[in-house]
Amino acid sequence: MTTVALDHVSKQFQQSSADGGRTITALDNLSLKLQSGDILGILGTSGSGKSTLLRLIAGLIEPDSGEVLYDGVPLREIPMIERGIGMVFQDGALMPHWESRKTVGFFLALRHREHEIPERVARIAQITGIGLDHLLARRPAQLSGGERQRVGIARALARDPRVFLFDEPFSNLDAKIRAQGRVELKRLLNAFPVTSFYVTHDQVEAVALAHRIAVMRDGRFEQIDTYQDLYHNPVNLFVATFIGTPTINLFPGFIVDHRWRGATFAGYRVRGDLEEGSPVTLGVRPERITPHDDGAAVQIDAVTPFFAERFALVEVHSESAERFQIALPLELHPQRGERLRVQPDPEGLLFFDPETGRRIG
Ligand code: ADP
Ligand code: MG
């Protein structure tokens, strides 16, 4: 079992002169520690540095400054063969002319341990409930996208990795196969606990597989926490709006008489040290706005039912023409055109400085 640490790691790229010749800071002073068996999800917009981070942890590229450490030892001092990295890419990155059997067994064969392959493959098949046997005689072109990713994962597992790196492994698959792949992988990671980094666009996948999640933007970690904490205690507006579907509602407002006042809602106490007239943005998640007799009057513009989750996402406008979304129980049968009174739950109020984006209450 292996701990992985990043110690003030930075990485820049020089664009070609055709692209403007600018210097891009892909990773900006990142520090982090994963204990053995930890699974870190990495979420972020495209270009935020997720793949660069994985390549750096894999030792495929070197940081300009800072250090990647496995069990406290700098990665650059660990010989390639002892690094033990299992990597799974978006497209599988399988050798086109190799049968899956050769792909899966490649690293064990390198170490003259071919005899272990059948047992490993059988174990993986047993845990996932997926017979790999019929896949093993085929080449990548004869495999579906989902099958290719299974072979890719089996290949990474068969080499007994110290560290597992996943770069959006299921993002090219359709929703149903993606969900199935997620469940299989979860079982595998429970059976073979390996320190893992899991890059994904899909928050559901991150929640299902990861113990903690790092939200990345512009090469930096905005916040590293459990999904629950990212959701309920975001450190800034970026994390608040990035995490959670449906998205959080944002209400612009000001401090008046030491309280927050917006166009639709008002009267909430914020931090005591804010000056009169300071702009403050209130964030409230759609399920934290609920019907209340003393609430603000709103009219329903649109209703989208979510049957499995048992709520209807309802778009409303208030008398001051402010638009926002609320999640109502399906049983209330909300209808377009209907009027009701609603109010945010006091525990669901998140206040932000609109200029810096930072959470202030
Ligand atoms: P993500 O995986 O989050 O989409 P990447 O890590 O691929 O982001 O890229 C981060 C930034 O670094 C982007 O601006 C990208 O264009 C740039 N970048 C990545 N690799 C290279 C490279 N080899 N040369 C130049 N720029 C690169
Ligand atoms: Mg990427």
Image (tube, helix red, strand yellow):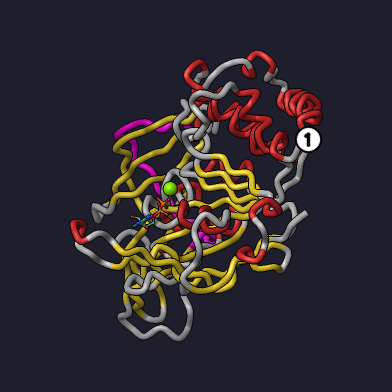
* As drawn, 199 above or below 283: above
Residue at horizontal 50%, vertical 31%?
A: 330
Which residue in the structure is indicated by mark 1? Answer: 113
* As drawn, 234 above or below 145: below
Is residue 292 visible to us here? no
Horizontal and vertical percent for residue 288?
50, 51
Horizontal and vertical percent for residue 40?
62, 53
* As drawn, 242 above or below 233: above
Is residue 21 visible to us here? yes
* Secondary-structure class at tag 1: loop
Q: Along the line of sight, which residue is nearer the eye, 246 or 100?
A: 100
Q: Is residue 59 magenta?
A: no
Residue at horizontal 48%, vertical 62%?
A: 349
Q: Which span is picked out in magenta?
A: 332-349
Residue at horizontal 34%, vertical 70%?
A: 354
Q: Is residue 344 magenta?
A: yes
Q: Quadrant of residue 100?
A: top right
Q: Is residue 88 left or right of residue 90?
A: right
Q: Name the amino acid type tagged 1.
A: Arg
For label 1, count other residues whose C-alpha is less than 10 Å away and answer few (under 14), some (14-19) or many (20+): few
Horizontal and vertical percent for residue 112?
76, 36
